[in-house]
């Protein structure tokens, strides 16, 4: 039985001819389908970040944290961590709809009577959802100089040396027959180096009780008071002992390149080379950690025949700005290969850590801004809290605050005393995205032939 269209709705006719049966219209079927209740969509749990701490953070003296905020400074999650821990951060997809990027903050709080207090906070902005981040201490070449592994104050260079490392020993180096030491450095092929002393009036130079890798070849160079630059190699023995050297047995550099300098307040420069391109970093030859404006030239010493050279020059021109150049070369560079950089226009609109804003007329590919609170007084433990923010040349996100639990546990952070210090604009070299992927062990980036940056200092 079917119903047919009739003027009188109560009249029902029986149809026996099959061909007269009217098929339901598509409109009716669609209407019936739409009337059926929709199935509820179950919320989906999304992994928005994975973090592995690797072996970068020793937990003997440190309290380490990873803190995640969205681009608007809203706290997503945070964890305390030690070495070789993995955390998978998850949220329902509905909670991540408005999250376009993540700011990853790594905080290391360190305080002990021997060294003082070092609170170091690094925020990496614009991190994509879903990334897997690894920290590591692989001996890889960063391809540019950074200041993240040392904190310098005046003439003091504070460096942490790993404890209880069976692969390292204590050695004293004696260099006889030297006409004073204007500058010197010791390095190995893996980037383990340091400039230890400057302007020492002596005929026997002593570098006492230094921590070096055992059974490792090191390179030492010395500039004496007579302007002689010489170098030699030595190998550390398995057992702690003295290393005896004679400056008369040192070799002379094959070639020098003098870089004329503009008037400046501070200077840092060095040359590195690799005998083997498969080695991760390279030996450090001539250089100076800090020179306070007295040099009109920087002398770079080179050994001929090496497959790879790196020349690094960093100047603080005056209280307002400075610049740095790192050049990678397959032959000995000349002065024109390390050009002078002109001062850009730069205006700080808001130097608040959480709402940084500035304008500039130069093109740049990454920025790093730095705040610190430092106490360096005689006969008092050293203290520093430093916060660094890195990002690309795109719109800057709001930087979220540290969680209350962390602030309560570390009252000596004194974040309210942080003062804006400087902003560094990378104008040539690795992009911010490449740097993040390299830092967090996602991929290697190809070494660039040239890195340039400009640093604009806070008004005093």
Image: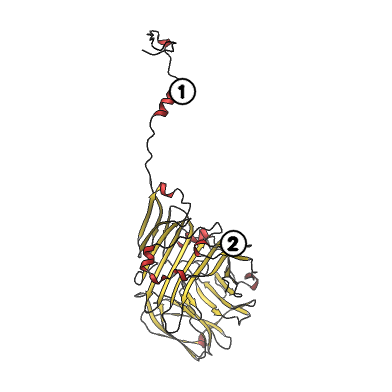
Which one is nearer the viewer's eye here, 50 or 1?
1
x, y percentage for residue 315? 59, 74
Q: Nearer the viewer, residue 72 or 235?
A: 72
Q: Which residue is mark 1?
A: 27
Q: Is residue 211 left or right of residue 266?
A: left
- Spot occupied by residue 42 in the image (x, y as percentages of width and height): 37, 41
The secondary structure type at the circle numbered 1 is helix
The answer to which image quadrant residue 106 occupies is bottom left
The residue shown at (57%, 85%) is 228
Instruction: Give the spatial CA distance, label 1 vs label 2.
Output: 60 Å
| Rendered position, 247 above or below 276 | below
Q: Are marks 1 and 2 in contact (CB under 8 Å)?
A: no
In the image shown, does 343 or 274 lie closer to the viewer? 343
Figure coloring = secondary structure
The crowding category of the residue bearing disc 1, from other C-alpha atoms within 10 Å (few below 14, some 14 to 19, many at least 20), is few
Mark 1 or mark 2, which is nearer to you?
Answer: 1
Image quarter in which the C terminus is found:
bottom right
Helix, strand or loop at label 2? It is: loop
The tag on residue 364 is 2
Residue under the point 35% across and 67% down: 409
176 up-or-down from 320: above or below? below
Tag 2 or tag 1, which sits nearer the N-term? 1
State the image coordinates of residue 313 (x, y, percent, origin top left): 58, 73
Residue visible at 38% across and 32% down? 37
């Amino acid at each position: 039985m079917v119903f047919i269209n009739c003027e009188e709705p109560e009249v029902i006719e029986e149809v026996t001819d099959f061909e007269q049966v009217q098929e339901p219209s598509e409109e009716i079927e669609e209407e019936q389908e739409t009337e059926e209740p929709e199935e509820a969509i179950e919320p989906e749990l999304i992994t928005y970040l994975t973090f592995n701490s690797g072996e970068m953070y020793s937990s003997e003296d440190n309290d380490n944290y990873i803190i995640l905020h969205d681009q608007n400074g809203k706290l997503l999650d945070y964890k305390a961590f030690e070495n070789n821990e993995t955390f998978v951060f998850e949220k329902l997809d509905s909670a991540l709809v408005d999250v376009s990027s993540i700011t990853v903050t790594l905080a290391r709080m360190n305080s002990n009577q021997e060294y003082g207090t070092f609170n170091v906070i690094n925020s990496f902005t614009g991190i994509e959802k879903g990334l897997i981040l690894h920290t590591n201490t692989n001996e890889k070449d960063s391809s540019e100089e950074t200041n993240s592994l040392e904190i310098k104050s005046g003439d003091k260079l504070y460096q942490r040396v790993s404890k209880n490392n069976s692969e390292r020993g204590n050695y004293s180096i004696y260099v006889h027959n030297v006409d004073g030491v204007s500058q010197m450095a010791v390095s190995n092929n893996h980037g383990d180096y340091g400039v230890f002393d400057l302007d020492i009036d002596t005929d026997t130079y002593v570098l006492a009780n230094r921590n070096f890798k055992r059974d490792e070849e090191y390179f030492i160079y010395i500039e004496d008071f007579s302007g002689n630059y010489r170098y030699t190699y030595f190998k550390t023995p398995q057992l702690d002992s003295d290393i005896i050297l004679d400056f008369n047995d040192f070799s002379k550099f094959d070639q020098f390149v003098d870089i004329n300098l503009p008037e400046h307040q501070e200077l840092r420069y060095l040359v590195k080379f690799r005998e083997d391109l498969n080695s991760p970093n390279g030996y450090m030859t001539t250089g100076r950690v800090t020179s306070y404006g007295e040099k009109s030239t920087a002398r770079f010493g080179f050994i001929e025949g090496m497959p790879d050279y790196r020349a690094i020059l960093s100047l603080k021109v005056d209280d307002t700005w400075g610049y740095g150049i790192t050049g990678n070369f397959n032959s000995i560079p000349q002065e024109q290969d390390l050009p002078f950089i002109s001062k850009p226009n730069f205006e700080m609109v808001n130097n608040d850590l959480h709402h940084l804003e500035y304008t500039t007329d130069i093109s740049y590919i990454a920025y790093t801004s730095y705040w610190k609170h430092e106490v360096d007084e005689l006969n008092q433990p050293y203290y520093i809290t430093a916060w660094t923010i890195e990002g690309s040349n795109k719109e800057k996100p709001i930087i979220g605050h540290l969680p209350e639990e962390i602030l309560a546990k570390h009252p000596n952070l004194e974040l309210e005393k942080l003062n804006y210090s400087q902003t560094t604009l990378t104008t040539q070299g690795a992009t911010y995205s490449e740097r993040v992927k390299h830092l967090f062990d996602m991929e290697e980036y190809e070494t660039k032939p040239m890195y340039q940056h400009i640093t604009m200092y806070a008004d005093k």
